Amino acid sequence: MNRRGFFTASALAAAGVAGFRVAAVNAADSPATGLVAAREFRIGEALVTALSDGYLPIDASALIGIDAEGFSALLADAYLPGPAHPTGVNAYLVDHGGRLTLIDAGTGTAFGDSLGHLVSTMTALGLNPAAVDAVCATHLHPDHIGGILTEAGNPFANASLHVNEDDLAFWSNGDIKSQAPAEFQGFFDMAMGAVEAFGDRLMPFKGESDLGAGLTSLPLPGHTPGHSGFMLSSGDDTLLFFGDIVHVGPVQFPRPEITIGFDVDTEVAAATRARVFDMASADRLRIAGAHISFPGVGYVEAATEGYRFVPQSWQYG
Ligand SMILES: [Zn+2]
């Protein structure tokens, strides 16, 4: 054993390997993208695993209220290159209260090679998708439920699906679908395909509901009519999974009024984002964002211009 190996082995022995559960994995199982990323951390007694499904480049053309120049300037302010931002797609597995709950389910094959890595990442970590007890969907957009629709069937075959009843009503409404632009027709089909994949294990919830295992839904409408966050509480610790409150962090933290073309109601979406940022910064509430750069967990702080995101520090134990 070389000195480095000896040091590592001694340090692990001193830490007590059996009790050392918080871990990070950054391994490449895909030569095309190198994307397998996971990070574990604790919220009270809950073990949360942030899981990367991949990323999608977004540029100014997808947003409303900012031009390419302003977009690139905000990226530069955040020490990031332009003209596009690789927006992450994150899901979170919560092991708490004797239940395995998955918050959002990835994209599946809907968006190409840079996405769709959720299930392979879980498998690489030894997490069996069939062991998931509940899937809580923040909303029924394809980047949150696409991972349910695989050729081999629903990977979360034993789970129940929890989704806000207003989202369900919107995406299952044939009249709304028939009036939607052609490019959004597939969104309706995917939403209903995912819902049907759970059969009688579909469990719609209303507004603020206790979903068990320390999770409570929180209505955050605008992006979609039933878009919801999930508050996880364990002991004195809390985390809000806030879904699609943010799509391009370096732009929307400083400028919360900037919206995205995928919002069903841009005005309500912007108002909800302002309300959530205000609440999170005033209460020093930890949040997890489906589209904040992986692992997407941290705090919202009032800044000279709007807000800034403060990533959660690394947890050692
Ligand atoms: Zn999304």
Image: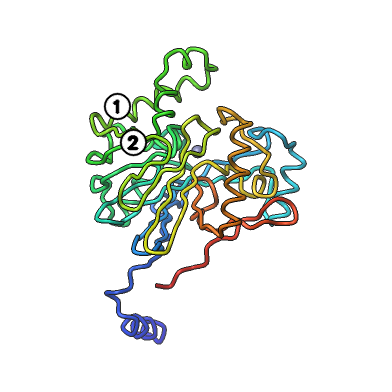
- Say what amino acid the circle numbered 2 marks: Ile
Q: Is residue 177 above or below residue 34?
A: above
Q: Is residue 281 above or below residue 259?
A: below
Q: Depth check: give the residue in front, 295 or 170.
A: 170
Alpha carbon distance from label 1 to label 2: 10 Å
Q: Residue at x 33, y 44 (%)?
A: 211
Q: Depth check: give the residue in front, 84 or 168.
A: 168
Query: Is 54 on the left or on the right of 68, as rendered?
Result: left
User: In the structure shown, which secondary structural element does the residue marked by tag 1 occupy?
Assistant: helix
Q: Position of residue 20 (x, y in %)?
A: 33, 73
Q: Position of residue 107 (x, y in %)?
A: 42, 38
Are there few (<14), some (14-19), or many (20+) residues within 10 Å of tag 1? few
Q: Residue at x 69, y 46 (%)?
A: 82
Total numbered badges shown on the rendered structure = 2
Query: Is 153 on the left or on the right of 110, as rendered?
Result: left
Circle on res. 196: 1
- Viewport quadrant of the N terminus: bottom left
Q: Is residue 9 above or below residue 144?
A: below
- Say what amino acid the circle numbered 1 marks: Glu
Q: Position of residue 65 (x, y in %)?
A: 72, 34
